[in-house]
Amino acid sequence: MLARPSMGRWGRPHANRADWWSSLPRLVIELFTTGVQLSHYDTYLRWLYQGGRPNRFARVQNRVSAIAFAAGVWPRRAATLEVRGRRSGRVISFPVVIADYEDERYLVAMLGEKTNWVRNVRAADGRAVLRHGRRENLHLEEVAIRNRPAILRRYLALAPGARPHITIDRHSPLEDFGRIAHQIPVFRITTVQQTTSLLGP
């Protein structure tokens, strides 16, 4: 396991640490997807998304993760989601953790309703592409609030990096997840059998 990066005031990593930058790709993958204990990183992870939006450093991490996951780098539950921006029209890529539950696959917006990719998916009528060593055309169907609690609990079991952003402990009963389910969009993944990308050229 990688050594923890040196942290400055408020949990910010020191900018002059060359070894931190050189180890960024592997560290991002560990933080985003593994079962490593992350208590020492909670402040740092919250800082990355203050105000519910990624800061500059979080955007760098997300780009690195998106490249790695799209290429098929472990683990299987991590992938890159591509969706067309509702304003720019550009295809936007970002890393996601896929939650498997009762033989279905789901994507969860850990930052809630204001998450940019959620708004883009809704504007695109659920059309998206998933990449993890191969390209998969998708339709993302939003899950009803009443059906989200068990999926949210499964998601937190798989995505340690999301835990500082979702206030319920991952071992809590489903009733606790039911109290926040309206705040956290969940989408069911359906593969679309299509030879060309749903996002166009």
Image (spheres, rainbow, N blue to C red):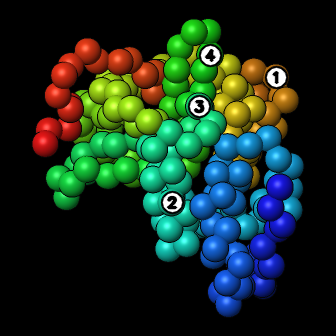
Question: Gap between marks 3 and 2, in whole Å?
Answer: 17 Å
Q: Earlier in the sequence, mark 2 or mark 1?
A: 2
Which quarter of the figure is the C terminus placed in?
top left
Q: For the residue marked with disc 1, what is the amino acid? A: Pro
Compared to residue 187, the image places residue 57 above or below, namely: below
Dot 2 and dot 1 residues touching (CB under 8 Å): no
* Coordinates of residue 54 in the picture (x, y in percent): 51, 64
Picture quadrant where residue 12 is located: bottom right
Question: Gap between marks 4 and 1, in whole Å?
Answer: 16 Å
Question: Gap between marks 4 and 2, in whole Å?
Answer: 27 Å
Question: Gap between marks 3 and 4, in whole Å?
Answer: 15 Å
On the picture, is 171 further left or further right than 93? right
Dot 1 and dot 3 residues touching (CB under 8 Å): no
Tell me the residue at 70%/75% (across/down): 20
Q: For the residue marked with disc 4, what is the amino acid? A: Tyr
Q: Nearer the viewer, mark 4 or mark 1?
A: 4
Q: Earlier in the sequence, mark 1 or mark 3?
A: 3
Q: Which residue is mark 1?
A: 173
Q: Which residue is mark 4?
A: 101
